[in-house]
Amino acid sequence: MSTGTRIVELRKGVLKKNDEIAAGLRSRFGAYSLPVVNLVSSPGTGKTTFLERTLRQLRAAGEHPAALVGDLETDNDARRLAASGAPVKQINTHGRCHLEAEMVGQHLEGWDLSAFTYLFIENVGNLVCPSSYDLGESARVTLLSVTEGEDKPLKYPSIFNSADVAVLTKMDLAGACEFDRETARRNIEEIRPGIRIFETSSKTGAGFAPWLHYLAEVRERARAHEFPVP
């Protein structure tokens, strides 16, 4: 019993420290009216491909996005995203299953935040731990691919409940996977009633117009200093 109590107290202490650092980051981002988007999903959802297309399309529209990329090891995803022309930094967690606010703060060093119109944080692929860690973001986006099945929101409710919007990815494969989009949407909305859901294909570009429109809304809220309460 006492061991369990110590574990709970330790977890509360870790989360409290993270929340304090995240609040500082949110104020720092707010000083530049910089919208920050935290992308969370399980491994294999197509998060990097989705972000790569997002970066390219934003740059083509004259925007100046940047990205922080979280992985346990390697800089493969960061090198891939950097090919878009956007500034990118890799964060290696070396075994940790999520990013923390302190990691984000450390990897902002050397960047002029006033030069960016968006900052994206690609979190470590995990549907459990990232739900508890505020990174100072303006919006949290949970991605679900058609290859994962429609019941993921019911199995991992915390990550969907903490999201501002949800994105269905790889919709070009929906038919081959016999993916039931109505069931998936219903399951997401059961966990997070009223949440906005985007259906996208990074391969074909389908669904990216409304997604980019949403990002413009996030940017306007940042400029108006309408920040979320974590």
Image: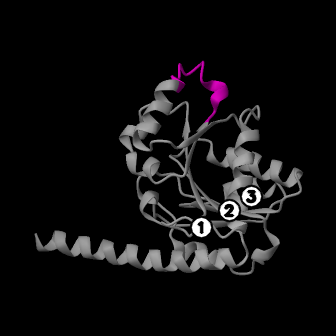
The magenta stretch spans residue 87: no
Which portion, as a residue range, is magenta? 169-181
Compared with 213, 68 (above or below) is below
The amino acid type, in three-letter code, at marker 1 is Phe
Whether residues under marks 1 and 2 lie with C-beta atoms below 8 angstroms apart, the answer is yes
Whether residues under marks 3 and 1 lie with C-beta atoms below 8 angstroms apart, the answer is no
Badge 1 element: loop
Give the label, 2 or 3, closer to the camera.
2
Q: In the rendered image, which residue does mark 3 sit on?
A: 79
Q: Position of residue 45 (x, y in %)?
A: 57, 41
The amino acid type, in three-letter code, at marker 3 is Arg
The residue nearer to you, when weighing 182 against 107, is 182
CA separation in Å, label 2 and label 3:
30 Å
Q: Residue at 25% of width from left, 76% of height from top?
A: 9
Compared with 115, 24 (above or below) is below
Q: Position of residue 16 (x, y in %)?
A: 39, 77
Q: In the rendered image, which residue does mark 2 sit on?
A: 221
Magenta stretch, main secondary structure, is: loop
Q: Tell me if I can see residue 20 in this picture.
A: yes
Q: Residue at 87% of width from left, 51% of height from top?
A: 61
Residue 227 is marked as: 1
Quadrant housing residue 17: bottom left
